[in-house]
Amino acid sequence: PTHKPMAGKIEDLVGVFEKTQCECLNASDKKPLANAIFSPAREDAAAVLESDCDAQLLIHITFQQIVKIHSIILETPEASRGQGPDKVVLYVNKPTIDFASTSSEKPSQEVAITPENLAGKPIELKFTAFQNVSTISMFVPSNATGDEDEMTILSKIAVLGLTTAGEGSKPSLEQQKAAAAGDWLNPK
């Protein structure tokens, strides 16, 4: 597929994750989502996200502002590669999607995951489908074992893209104060 280059610098968007609104359905209590998305745990192959009662995972990541997503990284430790996802189904701005609705909801993109991807190679996404993203949901229906009862393991989940440079985000308190001071100093 041909991808238009994105203007600006593509970066890891973890800094704009709304931490309290990132969740994973069917995650093990002992091996939660935080292990795979937040530093320093996500850089530690021993700290993993693991599914709980079967291979399926449904990960919701909410952003503090609108972002454009270029690619994702879904990494599995080398010793557990066989339990890495073999496919991911992505949904943009569908924060309430659950396991039951994944079969009827039209995905933004469905991607086969290769062993190279599980080793850390970014998975490039369809540029046009990931433009004005406030939430991304990642449904992992199965893993490389092919056994639906075998747990899925991920050590790192990263979302790479661009923040939209203030579009749709609230100004910080400092920016509000500076603007108010500026208005006061420069009456019309």
Image: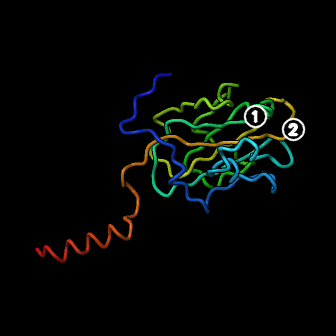
Regarding mark 1 in the picture, which secondary structure is present there?
Answer: loop
User: How far apart are labels 1 and 2 at the CA level?
Assistant: 10 Å
Could you say which disc has been placed on residue 115 in the image?
Answer: none
Label 1 environment density (alpha carbons within 10 Å; few <14, some 14–19, many ≥20): many
Residue picked out by circle 2: 150
**163 left or right, relative to 35:** left
Residue visible at 62% across and 52% down in the picture: 38
The one of 26 and 116 positioned closer to us in this rendering: 116
What secondary structure is found at the residue carrying circle 2?
loop
- Residue 88 at what x, y percent from top left? 67, 36
What amino acid is labelled 2 in the image?
A: Glu
* In the rendered image, the vertical position of residue 119 relative to residue 51, given as above or below: above
Q: At label 1, which amino acid type do we have?
A: Gly
Spot the residue most to the top.
1
Q: Nearer the viewer, residue 168 or 96?
A: 168
Residue 64, horizontal then vertical, whole percent: 49, 58
**Where residue 93 appears, x then y in whole percent?**
55, 50
Q: Left of 96 or right of it: where is 54?
A: right
Which quarter of the picture shows residue 91?
A: top right
- Is the image coloured rainbow, by chain, by secondary structure, or in one colour? rainbow
The residue at the point 19 percent across, 73 percent down is: 183
Whether residue 103 can be seen here:
no
Res. 65 in view: yes
Q: Is residue 171 above or below residue 110?
A: below
Identity of the residue drawn at 51% across and 43% down: 12
Disc 1 target residue: 84
Q: Earlier in the sequence, mark 1 or mark 2?
A: 1
Going by the image, does 103 lie left or right of 61? right
Q: Position of residue 134 (x, y in %)?
A: 51, 52
The C terminus, quarter of image: bottom left
